[in-house]
Image: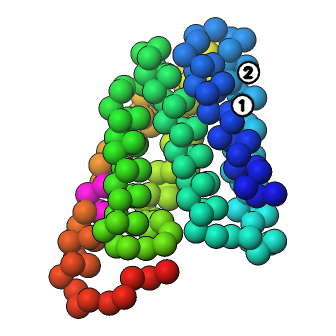
Amino acid sequence: MANALTAVRLLLVLPFAYLMTKGDQRSALLALAAWVVAVITDLLDGPIARRRGTVTAWSGTFDHVSDFLFVTCGLFAGAVRGVFPWLLPVLITAAFAQYVIDSYWIHGRTKLRGSKLGRYNGILYFIPTFMDILIRMGLQVLQPLLTILVWLLVLSTLVSMAQRVMLSRLSEQLPSSPPQK
C-alpha cells in the first residue's frame, strides 16, 4: 500500500512538470491538484509502511527518488519559464547524487544515510513550486518571499553538501568500523 502511494507520486512527475512549464491559471490549478496529491501521498506512505511493518531500504529509496524527481522536475520546469534560477534544481540534483553516492558507495550502506539539514531541505524543496502556483493564481504578493526562499534553499543546499563532505572526511579519520545496515 505504501509503495503504491509512492508510485502515484512518481506517476505525477511528468504531468506536474508539464503544468509547471505553463504560466496560465488553469495550468496552475491543475498543478496545484497534482502538488496536493503528491504531498498527501508523501505524508501517508511512511506512516502506513511503519504501521504495516513493510519498511525496507528499497521502499525508503523509492520514496526519496520519487520526492527528488517530483521536486526537481517541477523546479526545472519552472526554470524553463524563468520563475526559478537554474541553480536551485541543478544543486538539488547534485546534492541528491552526493547523498546516494555517499550512502551506498562511499559508506557501503544498504540504505540512504540522511542528515537533519538534508531532511529539512527535502521538505522545503516542495514549497517553491507551491508558491509559484499560488502566484499564478493571483497571489503576486508572495513573489518577494519566493525569491528569498529560493536563494535560502540554494544556500542551505550548499551547506548540506559541504556538511556531507566534512562528515565523510571525518569518518575516514576515525578508526574503521563495519558499515551500518
In the rendered image, residue 126 lying in the magenta stretch gets the answer no
Name the residue tied to disc 2. 30
Residue at image location 38% in from the left, 73% down from the top = 108
Q: Quadrant of the N terminus?
A: bottom right
Residue 112 spot, x, y in % from top left: 48, 65
State whether residue 135 is above or below residue 56.
above
Residue 133 spot, x, y in % from top left: 62, 23
Residue 94 spot, x, y in % from top left: 34, 45
Q: CA distance from mark 2 to mark 1?
A: 6 Å
- Which three-letter amino acid code belongs to the residue tagged 2? Leu
Asked if residue 127 can be seen in this view, the reply is no
Task: State the extent of the magenta-drawn residues as a range.
Answer: 160-164
The secondary structure type at the circle numbered 1 is helix
Decide if residue 135 is on the left or right side of residue 107.
right
**Given the current orientation, which residue lies at the most extreme top position?**
24
Badge 2 vs badge 1, beta-carbon distance below 8 Å:
yes
Name the residue tied to disc 1. 34
Give the main secondary structure, helix, strand or loop, of the magenta stretch.
helix
- Which three-letter amino acid code belongs to the residue tagged 1? Ala
Residue at image location 60% in from the left, 19% down from the top = 18
Q: Residues within 10 Å of mark 1 (few under 14, many from 20)?
A: some
